């Protein structure tokens, strides 16, 4: 986000694995790693979010996966890691629209079809509680939507509703991709698929009933927000109420 970092820097070029993947894999091999988790960039593979595939992006990920396997390192691939294509944000506000689910599933299908012959470990979404909070609650991350008093310096947004809409669509996208993989690819490719959750456990500050209830409520709103639907098919009762 140009203009929203303390020193004005961006992450346009960081570790630059795109140009140094062979060196990186050699270092991993030297360290004795037998697995490496990395994320595919949706806009690198499909710049407009849907439709035409970028051949250079496809070539890069094929080369990286092959290089890892050549050195005895299993690729663990994350499909979505906070990098929604800008075109989809501009077209229908990204995670706030149910159209995200269809486009994400089509993108996941490209990943399964292109890399699933070698990738046996898939992560649908990385830490899905981060983007709704950072992007739609406190406004610290793209697309910087929030409302007072939860966030500041946002041009628009509603912190009371939008985080939950975004999270709901991420959960449905996860479910859609898992169903697609199990129905169309798992038998032939023999891989596993799941999700990566971030969780902080909260303990009561004192032994009062009020603090005990607050700790349970915080765990439900943080961990249960995603774990409960994945296990039980619905949100925690405290969230629904």
Image (cartoon, rainbow, N blue to C red):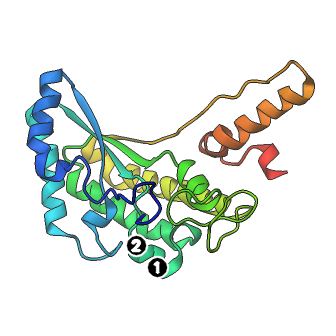
**Mark 2: secondary structure:** helix
In the image shown, does 26 or 238 lie closer to the viewer? Answer: 26
Residue furthest toward the bottom? 91
Q: Is residue 36 above or below residue 98?
A: above
Residue furthest toward the top? 207
Q: Is residue 239 above or below residue 69?
A: below
Q: Quadrant of residue 88?
A: bottom left
Left-right relation of 10 to 225: left
Left-right relation of 32 to 192: left
Residues tagged 2 and 1 counted as in contact (Cβ below 8 A): yes
Residue in view at x 46 percent, y 79 percent: 90
**Mark 1: secondary structure:** helix
Left-right relation of 97 to 150: left
Tell me if I can see residue 235 in this picture. yes
Q: Quadrant of residue 86?
A: bottom left
Image mark for residue 90: 1
User: How many other residues sit within 10 Å of disc 2, few (<14), some (14-19) or many (≥20)?
Assistant: some
Residue in view at x 49 percent, y 53 percent: 174
User: How many other residues sit within 10 Å of disc 1, few (<14), some (14-19) or many (≥20)?
Assistant: few
Q: Where is residue 98 drawn, in percent x and y? A: 56, 70
Left-right relation of 200 to 19: right
Q: Which residue is mark 2?
A: 86
Q: Where is residue 115 drawn, in percent x and y? A: 21, 52
Q: Where is residue 221 drawn, in percent x and y? A: 71, 43
In the image shown, does 181 or 108 lie closer to the viewer? Answer: 108
In the image shown, does 178 or 23 lie closer to the viewer? Answer: 23
Q: Is residue 21 above or below residue 2?
A: above
Residue in view at x 44 percent, y 56 percent: 82
Q: Is residue 108 above or below residue 237?
A: below
Residue furthest toward the front? 7
Image mark for residue 69: none
Q: Quadrant of the N terminus?
A: bottom left
């Amino acid at each position: 986000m140009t203009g929203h970092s303390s020193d004005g820097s961006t992450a346009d070029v960081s570790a630059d694995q795109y140009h140094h993947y062979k060196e990186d894999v050699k270092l991993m091999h030297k360290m004795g790693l037998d697995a490496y988790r990395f994320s595919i960039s949706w806009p690198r593979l499909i710049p407009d979010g849907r439709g035409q595939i970028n051949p250079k992006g496809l070539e890069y990920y094929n080369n990286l996966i092959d290089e890892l396997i050549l050195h005895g390192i299993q690729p663990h691939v994350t499909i979505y890691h906070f990098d929604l294509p800008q075109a989809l944000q501009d077209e229908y506000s990204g995670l706030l629209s149910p159209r995200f689910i269809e486009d994400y599933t089509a993108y996941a299908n490209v990943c399964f079809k292109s890399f699933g012959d070698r990738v046996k470990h898939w992560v649908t979404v990385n830490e899905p509680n981060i983007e709704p909070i950072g992007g739609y609650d406190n406004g610290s991350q793209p697309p910087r939507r929030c409302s007072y008093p939860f966030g500041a310096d946002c041009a628009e947004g509603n912190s009371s509703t939008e985080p939950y809409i975004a999270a709901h669509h991420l959960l449905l996208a996860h479910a859609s991709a898992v169903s697609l993989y199990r129905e169309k690819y798992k038998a032939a490719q023999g891989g596993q698929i799941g999700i990566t959750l971030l969780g902080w456990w909260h303990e009561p500050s004192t032994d009062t009933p009020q603090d005990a209830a607050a700790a349970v409520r915080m765990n439900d709103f943080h961990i249960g927000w995603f774990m409960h639907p994945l296990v039980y098919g619905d949100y925690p009762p405290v969230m629904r109420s």
